Image (cartoon, rainbow, N blue to C red):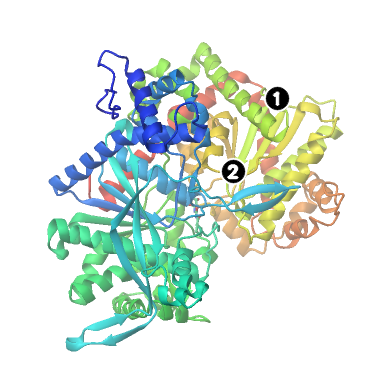
Amino acid sequence: MTDSQIAAPPTAPAATVPASTALASAIVDTLVHRIGKDAQAARPHDWLAATIFTLRNEIIERWMESTKAAHAAGAKRVYYLSLEFLIGRLLRDALSNLRHDDEVAEALATLGVDLAQIEEIEPDAALGNGGLGRLAACFMESLASLDLPAYGYGIRYVNGMFRQRLDDGWQMELPENWLAHGNPWEFERRESAYFVGFGGEVTSAAEGRVHWSPAEAVEAVAFDTPMVGWRGKRVNTLRLWNARAFDPIKLDQFNAGDFKGALDGQLRAETLTRVLYPNDSTPAGQELRLRQEYFFSSASIQDIVRRHVQYFGDIRTLADKAAIQLNDTHPAVAVAELMRILTDFHELPFDVAWDITRATFGYTNHTLLPEALESWPLPLFERLLPRHMQIVYAINAKLLREASKVEGIDGRAIAAISLIDEGGERRVRMANLAFAGSHSVNGVAALHTELMKKTVFADLHRLYPDRINNKTNGITPRRWLQQCNPGLTALLGEAIGPDFQDDAAKLTALVPFADDASFRERFAAVKRSNKVTLSTYIKESMGLTLDPDAIFDIQIKRIHEYKRQLLGIIETVALYDQIRSHPERRWTPRVKLFAGKAASSYHNAKLIIKLANDVAKRINADPAIGDLLKVAFVPNYNVSMAERIIPAADLSEQISTAGMEASGTGNMKFALNGALTIGTLDGANIEIKDHVGDDNIFIFGLTADEVAEKRAGGYRGRDVIAGSAELAQAVNAIASGVFSPDDPSRYKGLMDGLYDHDWFMLAADFDAYAAAQRDVDAKWNDADSWGRSAILNVANMGWFSSDRTIGEYAKQIWGVM
Ligand code: F58
């Protein structure tokens, strides 16, 4: 880095002074003039802010260049609309992508500041729940790395994902205020503010035109965060909307003594962008959620249209210059909003507007669970968005007219295609709206996409057979290898050179090293060192001692019954039982780590967390077990925790009921860091298996087809449990209170469910899972075989880079590559 890249202080040292010294004085200058502290008084968070502000100067320059270049080239832009961006920390990402990490570490060291330490106090931007939100963050990084002009649009939640605290093993949700100390990464853009209305009425005006007069309105104000691509190639914008009242304080009311009333509007507006709905895989269903969805969709569409008209003049060319991707159905109302703007404001005929809309939008589906498909009660939708309701009806009329002309589409199919669900309380189906309003509808892994065609979208697929396509998810290898696992990254560099950093597909050059004994040793040493680091953290934070030579067997993700943490826990109990019953056998030491958050209203998920904690307490304290088995539930799982845990994993648990996990992305992060997967044939596990090879992954259990067949054939968990002594014993022990002596019936209901309502087929898969775990033990005890497989995982995971995924979206959906 040169002095001109990071702004030098007024008293910049001469050019001969080492860059790190110049940089050190730039940071001190920022500290003094921006933060208002001197080096002696500065606290770690002051140094953090000073470092970010100093680095920002270079980012801003590149940011402006990127924007200007896209403008000059008249480039088509990608707009990624997502209610969630699970970004995590940004400093290490920006430093590493700009290749300034060493230099900044050195400069800070001369000031007596440890970069690693201040990186650790940066709060996580946790504006998302799980996979869907993290995918959006990986996509933003890849878009910039691939030099594609793109904007992410979302909500600037004041309180993102809650902080999880465990009180005696019970999850407690605490607000996480990531903005408490300010956010040095964001730029408020007061000039980019839009009116967003709700409610009111629609009246007809002259010449068949309509006029919507909303009953209330808020102002959407943009806050921009730079998204730095690999090697700083490009800097894109993540634009998050904040809601504000037009009239923050009603002075007349205030002066009359009505202080609360005077601030009502402000409070109402602020409530809109106050919290992220902490649900995963179940829709929220509250009015506030629909308000959030419309608020950010409307502001984003207005911004996109404004930019297009300003740069290109003619609104009719929108689809040539803008590709809008809907991240799930949460922004689906944007389809109606664009139609409204095109017809009511730009006065385009309905059919012309509809062609433009469909050519502009693409929709990504992330779930098949019917209960997770968003729909809104029609009266609520109509009350809040009366003009959009009319537009939805008009779209529906066109859609159903078209459908009725297609051979083989009968009354049942028409009802399934309709944007309005007429069964019971009438509801607006957001997935159908997103499907109808897009030229591309994609799933996120091959199996998921095929199931979309056969199940939830079967009838829409018959109507538009070319619309559904697959884009298997990916993860950014910058955050999920280079930054989180510097030891492995260095080793890879020594073995195959640095090219894999620019193109993850080049990791295949590592394949021959799997057979190199000395490389395997070095590879194992890196993994062990990562395990020691994690063990130190667990010791310090939880007081639990782990043996770094045990298998680190890890299941971290949102807690959900379909993800089957319960299967992992029951198998742990069964293993515990086996070890106690057969102390004479040679057991392979295991560490079982669990982490993840449960939706606050999800009773069984919270009970599963408590069970994991109860089981851990009992096993860890049992002297008969010693170091053979240790169990821990690590609290407050988030992006930063994942970065800490994943590099230390030997075994990655991906054990969802087949057909239920759309893709998974944690599975990719683990394998890229040299963990072997134990998993079902679900989501992207199938493609991971195809890439790493059957010998280097532990696959078990029912296939998606078998699950469907069994469910149709009246499967009963009870029959299976009766036939599996190991399972029966573990289930009985849990049900009878062995792990909950303070409340023996605590898990009775949860265990009873396995007998009579085992929807997730836990019992059906148990024996196969337990057997696969013993295969894991056997392989672990052959260190050469394990090492070989682990290396082949790393070598073959390059395909799962989000650069590959984004390349496919860019070429096949957006037309920008
Ligand atoms: C996840 N969905 C899928 N939804 O479960 C996972 O298989 C996939 O890898 C990932 O998307 C990325 O494609 C997911 O995270 C949510 O969190 C929604 C939040 C809002 C309510 C409904 C669930």
Q: Nearer the viewer, residue 110 or 593?
A: 110
Residue placed most toward the observer, 304 or 633:
304
Q: Quadrant of the C terminus?
A: top left
Q: Nearer the viewer, residue 26 or 779?
A: 26
The location of residue 312, given as percent across then percent down, is: 13, 57
Q: Can residue 746 be seen in the rendering of this structure? A: yes
Q: State whether label 1 is within 8 Å of ligand 1.
A: no
**Position above or below: 280 against 664:** below
Left or right: where does residue 17 sit relative to residue 673? Answer: left
Q: How many marks?
A: 2
Q: Which mark is residue 547?
A: 1
Mark 2: which secondary structure? loop
Q: Would residue 466 be visible to someone looking at this image?
A: no
Mark 2 or 1, nearer chain start? 1
Q: Position of residue 310 (x, y in %)?
A: 16, 59
**What residue is at 48 percent from the left and 72 percent from the top?**
264
Q: Position of residue 536 (x, y in %)?
A: 65, 26
Q: Circle 2 is placed at which residue position? A: 637
> Would you identify the image quadrant in which residue 572 lies?
top right
The kind of residue on which mark 1 rests is: Asp
Question: What is the spatial separation of the Cα atoms under label 2 and label 1, in whole angstroms?
Answer: 22 Å
Q: Residue at x 47, y 24 (%)?
A: 486
**Foreground: disc 2 or disc 1:** 2
In front: 577, or 816? Answer: 816
Label 1: state its secondary structure: loop
Disc 2 marks which amino acid?
Tyr
